[in-house]
Amino acid sequence: MFEQLKQVSALVLNEGDNVATVLADVAKGARVMILGRDGRCICQIEAKEVIPAGHKICVKPVLPGESVVKYGNDIGCAVSGIATGNWVHVHNLASRRGRGDLAAGKGGCA
């Protein structure tokens, strides 16, 4: 499996995830192989923008207000539409973690 990891660009650990974690810097226009937990290639997608290593790439379209799911966990919601192949980060994701404003019924995506 370690040989496969050298060839793979991103990992998805839960079939419900709509993002994958890239293993190395990804250039705009690059083909990104998405590897599942079982070590098999799930799909290949084109990166729509530069994505730094360790960051998230969208593997399924996410509409504004919908949950972003990583490792089977809801990590936040899309503040704008996120297309397959886009970088998912603070510019298009409102985190639900550590947000006292959400507990108080305030804040962006609830």
Image (tube, helix red, strand yellow):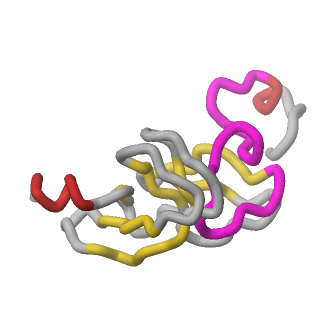
Q: Is residue 68 magenta?
A: no
Range of magenta residues: 79-100
Residue at 11% over, 57% down: 3
The picture places residue 37, in percent across and down from the top left corner, at: 25, 62
Q: Is residue 85 magenta?
A: yes
Q: Quadrant of the C terminus?
A: top right
- Looking at the image, is 61 positioned above or below residue 91? below
6 or 73, which is in the foreground? 6
- The picture quadrant where one finds residue 47 is bottom right
- Looking at the image, is 100 positioned above or below residue 66? above
Answer left or right for 68 relative to 81.
left
Q: Residue extending furthest bottom?
A: 43
Answer left or right for 13 relative to 106.
left
Residue at 83% over, 56% down: 80
- Looking at the image, is 86 positioned above or below residue 50? below
Answer left or right for 41 relative to 1.
right
The picture places residue 36, in percent across and down from the top left corner, at: 30, 66
| Main SS, magenta residues | loop
Residue at 59% over, 44% down: 75
Q: Quadrant of the N terminus?
A: bottom left
The picture places residue 76, in percent across and down from the top left corner, at: 66, 45
22 or 27, which is in the foreground? 27
